[in-house]
Image (tube, grey):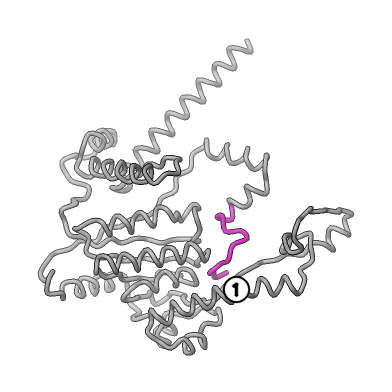
Amino acid sequence: MKNKKGLFILIVLIALSLIFGIKSIITKGLSKPNFSFSFSTSSDFDDEYEDEFSDEFDEDFSNNGTLGRIISIARNKNTDSPVTSKKTPYIAVIHIRGIISEENKTYNQKWLLKQIKKAKNDPNNRGIMLFINSPGGTVYESDEAYLALINYKQVTKRPVFAYFGALAASGGYYIGCAADVIFANRNCLTGSIGVIAGQVMDATELLDKVGVKMTTITAGKNKNMGNYNSKLTEEQRAIFQSIADEAYEQFTQIVAESREKPIEEIKKIADGRVYTANQAKALGLIDAVAEYEVAKDDFKDYFSGTEEKAGEEVIFVDYKYRYEENWLSLISGAASFAKNPEASLYQLMGNSAGKCLYLYQ
């Protein structure tokens, strides 16, 4: 009897896995024209192979290849209408949403860098429009995205525009500084030019009151600095401050170069506060306050004004990162949390715990 129950449960689990797996594939297939597969490897050769494979996968779907047709038939989609023609000149609208970090449910650094790389290598791409709705995030990922966009402009000589949605603060503004022109919604909050280098919680007195004594064995007198079971010394405070100061110098220098203003002028307004769109416009942190469609029209005018591409019709193609979670990943996450709660909390924080942040809170 027990064997029969176990077999029944196993069959149910397999059936649910198949249902969620098929649903995930179909949803991904119809939600966007580009696919990607990741291989857990470390060599440069494998990275190149991954890009080549994913590009062929994209080509198959975009051109209504076998895979595209299978998914289309499964959802009763008309396979005669193309998803996105790679022969059509286009502007890539890359959406940057949520906290900027290595990876979380709204943002994925590898995905973002891949979209920039694809646009750079595509001869039919005519420019990038960033749609930013983010409070910022880690210094490393913010700067990496900024540098990728600068490289895109230098290599292709194509323009980058940015449109700020409800929030484009700190690291979100930092990435936007790669743009030639910055637009913002009239209700946008932006700026927050500053750094968080350490958020330290001292729970030593609380632990003493409840009778909990915790000892961390370290080598190096500052190895445990910032831990909740250790008081922060003046030396350690100075260490954190030096990290913040260096990241701040980098941030303000980026803004000064982007906005073509003296660094001293930027530092006067870079005290960490956020600004409304109109305030940011008055301070020269953005170029215009406008609706999104107006910004797109201006981008087209900017583009068509070039002698080389005058009269060419271009379209806007949206690229949005989509995180998909199924019941299996939820069960796995719960098991992981039970086994190692500290590591799981680190992941829930978007892998940004303990890192230097360009973040509006």
Classify 116 as above or below 191. above
Helix, strand or loop under label 1: helix
Residue 324 placement, left or right of 292: right
Q: Nearer the viewer, residue 151 or 287?
A: 151
Residue toward you, 37 or 183: 37
Image position, residue 288 (x, y; %): 33, 80
Q: Is residue 146 above or below residue 275?
A: above
Q: Main secondary structure of the magenta part?
A: loop
Write the start and end of the magenta stretch as one range: 348-361
Any magenta on residue 54?
no
**Residue 220 rendering spot, x and y as whole percentages:** 74, 60
Please, is residue 61 above or below residue 172 in the view?
Answer: above
- Please tell me which residue is depicted at 76% across the width and 68% down the height of the picture: 232
Q: Position of residue 123 (x, y in %)?
A: 19, 58
* Category of crowding for the residue at label 1, using alpha-carbon neighbours closer than 10 angstroms: few (below 14), some (14–19), many (at least 20): some
Task: Locate residue 91 relative to residue 233 in the image: left or right.
Answer: left
Residue denoted by label 1: 244
Split into 4 quadrants, where in the image is the N terminus? top right
Please tell me which residue is depicted at 74% across the width and 73% down the height of the picture: 235
Quadrant where the C terminus sits is bottom right
* 197 on left or right of 19: right
